[in-house]
Image (cartoon, rainbow, N blue to C red):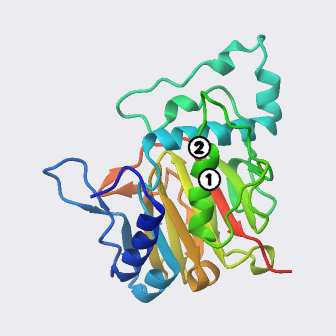
Amino acid sequence: MFRSAWTGTEIVKAILKTKRCRHLRCYSISSGPASSPTLLVRPFGNPDPDILQSDFTLLPHFYTAAETRQLLAAALWKLDRGDSTRRRRSGPSHPQAQLPHTSSANSPPLADLFHGQYGFEPGHYDAVIHQYRESLMSTLPTPSSSSYPDLITLLHKAYALLLPDSTSIANGTPPSNVITHLLHLSPEGQIKGHVDNLEASGGVISGICLGADRILRLSKGEAGSSEKGWDVLLQNGTVYLQRGRLRYEYEHSILPYDSTDSNWDGRPLVPGHRVSVMIRDAPKA
């Protein structure tokens, strides 16, 4: 059963529990009391489970629905400040930019917070990321009593998870030994398979998932023949950590919605916007 909130002690216990779970079976989802549990991780190609156990931590529902609204509101505010399309259309001459998307029972989580037009980049310089916006978060937005009053506390939970011994947030600035990066993927966006550059970041990366469900693929080998790895269902409020061999020997990607594998339990994922807050430990000088 998922908890609606995580304390510091529960975070540590959850990580240890994840390490002991052979296929992350301790973390499952259920659409109702009578339904069967659904695993959040599905292997393909007979991968080595020891690598997943040692190098991957999955914490579903780490943040409550209310907490994810605060985090997403702050992230979108920061992203919009660097988006020329949003700046041009935020004035009174473009009132349509303030209209929310139509929400329904089938809408992705937090769909009502995404509205108007965004200045998505068609492709990253290395051709890995497509249809996206991004921003470094070197300073934190000023907490707002109405939109994100608990922002510092919520981010502190994530920083403590990555680096328990160095988590201070002073004067609205993230800890000096981490890099915080915001990435907004459009419903048409994707991240192609890649491994991280060891010289550009440290040994651990964590991701806070906000918005629509997406599938993270961790793979090694040639596609269609010797490929092996895992697909991970990333839901709103989930936090994951990736380290070691799984980060630098396995490619990681976010599947596009039109992929035949963008489904879970035979049901296609509902397309929607997704923002991830990526936190890396800074590389050593």
Count numbered badges in the picture. Answer: 2
Q: Give 105 or 239, whichever is nearer the viewer.
A: 239
Image quadrant in which you'd find residue 114: top right
Kind of residue at badge 2: Leu
Pointer 2 or 1: first along the chain: 2
Label 1, secondary structure: give it. Answer: helix
- Asked if labels 1 and 2 touch by Cβ distance under 8 angstroms, the answer is yes
Kind of residue at badge 1: Leu
Q: Which mark is residue 256?
A: none
Q: Which mark is residue 155?
A: 1
Residue 119 in view in this figure = no
Name the residue: 42% across, 85% down. Answer: 47
Name the residue: 35% across, 57% down. Answer: 264
Q: Quadrant of the N terminus?
A: bottom left
- Residue identified by numbered label 2: 71
Relative image position of residue 8 (x, y in whole percent): 48, 63
**Mark 2 or mark 1, which is nearer to you?**
1
The Cα–Cα distance between marks 2 and 1, rounded to whole angstroms, is 8 Å
Q: Is residue 29 above or below residue 103?
A: below
- Residue at the extreme right: 285
Q: Quadrant of the C terminus?
A: bottom right
Image quadrant in which you'd find residue 177: bottom right
- Residue at the extreme left: 34
With 173 as the anchor, is 196 left or right in this view? Answer: left
